[in-house]
Amino acid sequence: MDRMPFVTGFGSTNVDLLYSGMPRVPQEGEEIYARDFTVQIGGGYPATLVNVGRLGIPARIQTFLGKDMFSRFAKAQYEEDGVIPLNLYTGDRMPVNVTSAVITPRDRAFTSYTDPVEVTDVHRQQVLDASRGAAIALVYRPFLPIYPELRRGGTLLVYDGGWWEDMRLDNMMDILEAVDFYIPNELEAMRVTQATSPGAAARVLAEYFEHVVVKLGGEGCLLYSGGRETVVPPLPGIKAVDTTGAGDAFLAGFVYGLIKGAPLPQAVLYGNITGAACVEKVGALTGFVTEHELLAKAQKYAL
């Protein structure tokens, strides 16, 4: 019997403590009670893989987990949502990142803890072994040496590296040449290419990719393919409450479309649907859709 295709990726685990319904951020020495509170896995590839698992696609994450309460919480959350975690950490510290977020009507404030773990060749081999046979791998730059072998084995490589100050074509060529899809938002795409519009950025990126996808936030998503530029519109009537994790949720829907062999505009529509569900709730993982809900919405908003 053929094994069901799976999605894999490495990601540092973030645990978010979200305090919402507060009139303002407390001053030093002051205590203010929140009306709502939740604890959940934070953004990045972990959030993408959780959303992939919620859509019924087998998912695996390689990450650093310790013996602390936050690591135990994250492991249980992964498993509950259909994600198989492989722990690469063997030390005695707390390797997960923890953020307390205070959300007010005007803005957000954060206090975070992190104790980074250095990626080694042992970790790279572990991730390679765990990722063999994957239909799709989410690419993380410190593991770049392992991806050519995965690609030769038929794994599709997808990269969404987020924002970093020094992102330019000349210092990203190694990763752009290694992957099949790069999924930036409009600011990232313009920063990388030094273009002045998302469309111009897409045309530059088309020199490296057969298909270019640029997220436009509340304006939908731009798809540039075969010399044609198409904007897949956003879902109507969406009231954004919190954009945390929107790009990660979009990526989950897009990956779902790739796994299912959907045409690219349809895969982008799936991404718009999962991204829209995310922004209607506070936190990276509070708002989501099931596979049934995704397909129903895709039929309703068919292109």
Image (tube, grey):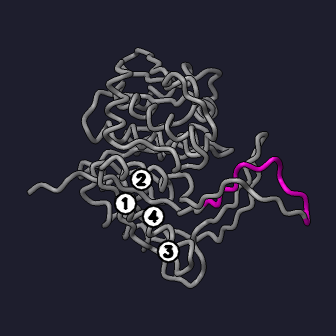
Q: Secondary structure at mark 1?
A: strand
Residue 300 or residue 51, whichever sits in front = 300
Specify which label sits upstream in the sequence, 1 or 3: 3
Helix, strand or loop status at disc 3: helix
- Which of discs 2 and 3 lies nearer the camera? The answer is 3
Q: Element type at marker 2?
A: helix
Disc 1 marks which amino acid? Val
Residue at x 70% of width, y 51% of height: 20
Q: Residues within 10 Å of mark 3 (few under 14, many from 20)?
A: few
Q: Could you tell me if the residues under marks 2 and 1 are in contact, i.e. CB atoms within 8 Å?
A: yes
Q: Residue 167: name its quadrant.
A: top right
The percent position of residue 37, horizontal first and vertical second, equals 65, 57
Tell me if 170 is positioned left or right of 124 in this view. right
Q: Earlier in the sequence, mark 2 or mark 3?
A: 2
Contact check, label 4 and label 3, Cβ < 8 Å: no
Q: Quadrant of the C terminus?
A: top left
What's the amino acid at mark 4?
Answer: Gln
Res 83 label: 1
Q: Earlier in the sequence, mark 1 or mark 4?
A: 4
Q: Is residue 186 left or right of residue 294?
A: right
Q: Amino acid at mark 3?
A: Arg
Residue receiving disc 2:
49
- Counting from the top left corner in percent of width and height, residue 106 is at 79, 39
Residue behind mark 3: 72
> Label 4 vs label 2: CA separation?
12 Å
Badge 2 or badge 1: first in the primary sequence: 2
| Mark 2–mark 3 CB contact (< 8 Å) | no
Q: CA distance from mark 1 to mark 4?
A: 8 Å
Would you say the residues marked 1 and 3 are in contact, meaning their CB atoms lie under 8 Å apart?
A: no
| Residue sitting at x 62%, y 24% | 195
**What residue range appears in magenta?**
16-29
**Residue 113 falls inside the magenta stretch:** no
